[in-house]
Image (spheres, grey):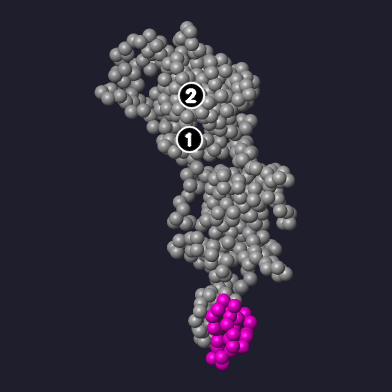
C-alpha cells in the first residue's frame, strides 16, 4: 500500500485516516469512504492482509457455490499447517514437501512434482508489457493455489490446457509446445494416480486387482489410447491450442485430473460428487480364478463405451479357467444373460473381443444392432463401432450342415471381423483391409488364430422370464448337460423339464 494525498485507491474507494490522508488499497473493491478505524476491516475483507481476493481470484471463486468457496479458500491454510492452523506470516508458500505429505499415498511422486511445478508457474496477475511476472519460483502462493483449484476442478478446456502443458513439459518452462512422448508420460502418471485412488479409497466396486491383469501395462495402453486422439499442429508438435481441442474431445483427461486434485488435496465439494469409474462386479467366483484378462485401466476404458442404459453389475458367466474349453458351455453364458462382453486371448498374446447389445440367439441369421462393437486390448487399446455399411453385427450357430457353425461379429461368412469356430480351439479375424461392419483391422496376432483363453461378462440386465414361466432364475436339470439341451432345441423338441429347477448356488465369493 502507498500513501497518497487526496486520491482514490486503484480500485476506486476512498480510504482515509483521521488526518485526511488517503491510502492506495491495492485489493479494495468497495466504493465507500473509509476512516482509519475502518481501514483494517477493508483490508481484511479485500485481501491486503492475506486473504485471497484479487480480481483474478474473485473471478475464479465465482465458479464455486457459496458454500464451496470457504472449502476452496481453506485448502492453503490446511496444507500449510493442518486443518484450523493459522496461515503464518505473509509470504509463506506451499513447498513440494507439503504437497507430498498430502498426496503421497494417492499419486506417484513424479505426478506430485508435476502438480507443484505447474502451481509455481501460475501468475495470479499476468504481467503487462514491460512488467516483470510475480509468479513464485520454488513455492506456491495462496492465489496460485486457488487459481489452480478453480481451473482444474471447474475450468474449461481452454483453461485446463495450460495446466496440462505445464505438467507435461518437464523443466523447460519456456517451451511453447510438448511432444507426444511427454504427454504420454504425463498421462501414465495421471492414470496411475487414479488407479491408486480407487484402491486407497476402496472404490473398486468389488473388483480384486490381485486376480486381474497387470495394471502397469494397462496404464501404458490407456495412456497410448488417449494420446492417439491428439491432433498435432502444422509443425507436428502439440501447442496449447492442440491440447485445448484434445481436452475438449477426450473427456477422460478432465475427469482424471479433477479426481486427482479433489482427492489428493482433499477438496470435498457438494456440487461435484466423486465419479464412479468402475462398474460394480457381482457373482464372480474369485477363489477359482488365477488372473482375469481384464485389468483396472482397461476396465476404466471399456465400461464407458457401453450404451448409457447398460449400468447393471458385471457378472462373469463363462471363463475357460473355470469352465474349460467348451463351446456349448460358453453358449449358456451367451444366450441367457442379456447383453455381454466377450474377451479373447490368442496364443500370440493378443487380447480382443466384442460387445453384444442383447442376448445371443442360436439361429443361422445375423442379429444385433448398431450398439454392438468390436475392440482390442493388447497390443493396442481401441474400440471399433458400427460403420453402417451392413447389419452383420452378431452371428451364432451350431450343429448346422449348410451354414457356418460358431460365433461371429462383423464382416461376412468366412471373413468375419471376429470368429470363433464351434470346435472352440480355432478362430479368425479377417479384415482386408478393414471389417465392413465395424471398420476394425484384424484383431488377432495372425488372421487364423488359436485360442488361449476366453471370458464372457454379462454387463446388462438379464432378460425377464417369459409370462407364465415358473421357476425363473433356477437351474433346469438339463443344465447339467447343456450340449444335449442345445441339440434338442435345434431339433425343435419341446423341453418339458424347463420348469423343474434346482436351487441356484451363490457364486459370489
Give the residue furthest to the bottom: 19
Residue 359 placement, left or right of 40: left
Q: Residue at x 49, y 22 (%)?
A: 392
The magenta segment: 1-25
Mark positioned earlier in the residue sequence (2 or 1): 1
Residue 15 placement, left or right of 170: left
Q: Which residue is drawn at 67% across and 60% down?
A: 121
Q: Where is residue 191 in the image (x, y as percent from the top left)?
A: 59, 44
Residue 477 in view: yes
Query: SS at mark 2?
Result: loop
Which of the 4 image quarters holds residue 488?
top left
Q: Where is residue 244 in the image (x, y as percent from the top left)?
A: 61, 50
Q: Mark 2 points at which residue?
A: 391
Query: SS at mark 1?
Result: loop
Give the residue furthest to the front: 389
Q: Residue at x 62, y 54 (%)?
A: 163
Front of the two marks 2 and 1: 2
Above or below, comparing residue 266 to residue 20 in the picture = above
Q: Name the residue under label 1.
A: 306
Above or below, comparing residue 463 to residue 252 in the picture = above
Residue 219 marker? none
Amino acid at each position: 500500500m502507498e500513501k497518497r494525498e487526496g486520491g482514490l485507491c486503484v480500485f476506486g474507494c476512498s480510504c482515509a485516516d483521521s488526518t485526511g490522508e488517503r491510502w492506495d488499497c491495492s485489493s479494495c473493491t468497495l466504493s465507500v469512504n473509509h476512516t482509519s478505524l475502518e481501514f483494517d476491516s477493508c483490508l481484511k475483507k479485500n485481501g491486503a492482509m492475506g486473504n485471497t481476493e484479487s480480481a483474478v481470484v474473485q473471478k475464479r471463486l465465482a465458479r464455486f457455490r457459496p458454500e464451496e468457496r470457504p472449502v476452496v479458500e481453506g485448502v492453503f491454510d490446511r496444507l500449510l499447517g493442518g486443518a484450523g492452523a493459522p496461515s503464518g506470516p505473509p509470504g509463506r508458500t506451499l513447498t513440494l514437501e507439503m504437497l507430498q505429505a498430502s498426496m503421497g499415498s494417492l499419486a506417484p511422486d513424479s505426478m506430485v512434482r508435476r502438480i507443484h511445478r505447474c502451481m509455481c508457474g501460475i501468475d495470479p496477475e499476468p504481467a503487462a508489457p514491460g512488467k516483470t511476472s510475480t509468479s513464485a519460483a520454488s513455492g506456491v502462493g495462496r492465489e496460485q493455489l486457488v487459481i489452480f483449484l478453480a481451473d482444474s476442478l471447474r475450468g474449461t478446456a481452454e483453461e485446463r490446457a495450460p495446466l496440462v502443458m505445464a505438467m507435461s513439459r518437464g523443466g523447460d518452462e519456456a517451451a511453447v509446445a510438448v511432444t507426444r512422448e511427454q504427454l504420454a508420460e504425463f498421462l501414465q502418471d495421471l492414470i496411475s494416480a487414479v488407479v491408486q485412488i480407487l484402491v486407497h479409497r476402496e472404490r473398486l466396486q468389488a473388483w480384486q486387482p490381485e486376480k486381474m491383469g497387470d495394471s502397469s501395462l494397462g496404464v501404458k495402453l490407456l495412456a497410448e489410447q488417449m494420446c492417439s486422439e491428439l491432433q498435432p499442429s502444422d509443425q507436428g508438435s502439440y501447442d496449447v491450442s492442440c491440447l485445448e481441442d484434445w481436452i475438449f474431445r477426450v473427456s477422460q483427461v478432465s475427469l482424471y485430473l479433477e479426481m486427482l486434485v479433489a482427492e489428493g488435496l482433499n477438496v470435498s465439494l457438494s456440487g461435484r460428487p466423486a465419479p464412479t469409474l468402475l462398474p460394480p462386479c457381482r457373482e464372480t467366483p474369485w477363489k477359482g480364478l488365477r488372473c482375469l484378462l481384464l485389468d483396472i485401466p482397461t476396465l476404466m476404458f471399456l465400461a464407458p463405451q457401453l450404451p448409457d442404459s447398460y449400468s447393471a453389475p458385471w457378472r462373469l458367466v463363462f471363463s475357460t479357467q473355470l469352465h474349460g474349453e467348451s463351446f456349448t458351455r460358453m453358449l449358456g453364458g451367451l444366450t441367457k444373460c442379456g447383453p455381454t462382453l466377450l474377451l479373447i486371448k490368442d496364443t500370440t498374446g493378443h487380447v480382443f473381443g466384442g460387445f453384444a447389445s442383447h442376448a445371443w440367439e442360436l439361429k443361422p441369421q445375423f442379429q444385433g444392432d448398431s450398439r454392438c462393437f468390436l475392440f482390442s486390448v493388447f497390443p493396442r487399446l481401441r474400440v471399433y463401432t458400427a460403420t453402417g455399411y451392413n447389419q452383420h453385427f452378431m452371428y451364432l450357430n451350431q450343429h448346422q450342415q449348410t451354414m457356418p457353425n460358431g460365433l461371429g461379429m462383423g464382416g461376412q461368412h468366412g471373413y468375419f471381423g471376429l470368429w470363433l469356430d464351434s470346435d472352440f480351439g480355432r478362430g479368425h479375424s479377417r479384415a482386408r483391409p478393414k471389417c465392413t461392419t465395424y471398420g476394425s483391422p484384424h484383431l488377432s496376432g495372425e488372421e487364423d488364430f488359436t485360442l488361449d483363453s476366453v471370458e464372457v461378462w454379462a454387463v446388462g440386465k438379464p432378460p425377464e422370464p417369459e409370462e407364465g414361466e415358473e421357476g425363473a432364475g433356477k437351474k433346469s436339470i438339463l443344465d447339467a448337460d447343456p450340449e444335449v439341451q442345445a441339440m434338442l432345441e435345434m431339433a425343435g423338441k419341446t423341453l418339458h423339464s424347463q420348469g423343474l429347477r434346482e436351487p441356484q448356488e451363490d457364486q459370489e465369493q
